[in-house]
Amino acid sequence: MRVGTVIGFQNPAAWRQGWTDLYAATLDFAVRADTLGYDEVWLTEHHFAEDGYCPALMPVAAAIAARTRRIRIGTKVLLMPFHNPVRLAEDAAVVDVISNGRLDLGVAAGYRHEEFAGFGIPREERAARTREGLEVLELALRDAPFSFTGRFGSYSNARVTPPAVQQPVPIWVGGRSPGPLRRAAEAGYHLQFADFDLDLCAADHAVYIDALRAAGRDPAAYEIAAVASVFVDEDPARARALAEPHMRYQQQMYQRWFAAAGDRISEPEANVAGLPPGCLVGSPEEVLEQILAAHRRVPFTHFSFWTLLPGLAPVAATASLELFAAKVLPGLHAA
């Protein structure tokens, strides 16, 4: 299993700090993940959010690429309808060059009404814009001229330079319904789960694997990434006291957004600690067993987690990241 951390640069009002301090501390956190031996750092995008949820992933990816040496840098996810695919390919290629081939591109269609209204894009076009954008993005990332005529854009004899180091750059798709999952499998994209509700993950996994096989693709050649919120401390009570307010903020925010969008909402019972689903808190040994138990049920190949939670002090998040690296990461790498 490959293991990474997720960062969103959120700055909630209840714990607000200066923006330059927030960005500096978060970039330091990503650098620390690199030195600790994590495989990946994932960046996540939203727009017009009150807490400043990061809207600009490629500049952040370039900043991390310039300060790290081995960790892969991915988007989890980039919202395709809001991006010109050729301009995005140029940005991605430059990040891939700066990082010497360490970029992963994860994309999704988006769902928040406020974002589509803010960009002046009809929300009902999100699936079509994502499908076309992905097609153009793949063409543009190849080290060759291409032409394309579509519903939302036309390109004639365009060639992205400099080319990406990776040929191809890995592309991932996040989805929360069977249609996008099947299309991702048919196109040969890797899969990112949207949450850590294991009932939903198991169902999504089955749809994706069946679609890969139906398309004549070998499931063993494709990667599947799970995501959760994690905080570890040798004292489980202290772990919960530190992390719970920030985890509840994060989970409640997403549930409000999903509900407002009419999207699928994860509402299983709270976990054994009484925390929202997808929140794993406790000693390193407890959290390791929870992740391995989830992996036995849904065989994901990548596991990423939020530890620098919205509003959490960076020093506390870094301590959890370090303890996880020492006592949880080896067990996951062996899985």
Image (spheres, rainbow, N blue to C red):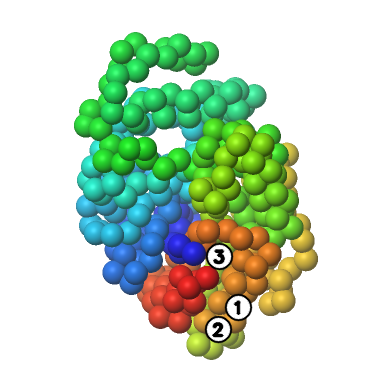
Whether residue 63 is visible, yes or no, is no
Q: Nearer the viewer, mark 3 or mark 1?
A: 1
Above or below, 322 against 302 in this view is below
From the image, tell me which residue sits under label 2. Answer: 285
In the rendered structure, which disc, 3 or 1, sits on the residue that comes first in sequence? 3
Label 3 sits on a secondary structure element that is strand
Q: Residue at x 53, y 37 (%)?
A: 188
Q: Residue at x 69, y 77 (%)?
A: 273
Q: Residues under labels 2 and 1: Cα distance?
A: 6 Å
Q: Position of residue 329 (x, y in %)?
A: 45, 74
Above or below, 268 against 175 in this view is below
Whether residue 229 is visible, yes or no, is yes
Q: Nearer the viewer, mark 3 or mark 2?
A: 2
Above or below, 272 against 202 in this view is below
Location of residue 199 by image quarter: bottom right
From the image, tell me which residue sits under label 3. Answer: 229
Residue type at mark 1: give it. Answer: Glu
Say few, some or many: other residues with alpha carbon within 10 Å of mark 1 (under 14 / 14 to 19 / 20 or more): some
Q: Position of residue 94 (x, y in %)?
A: 25, 38
From the image, tell me which residue sits under label 1. Answer: 289
Q: Residues under labels 3 and 2: Cα distance?
A: 16 Å
Q: Residue at x 62, y 55 (%)?
A: 195
Q: Nearer the viewer, residue 216 or 244?
A: 216
Residue type at mark 2: give it. Answer: Glu
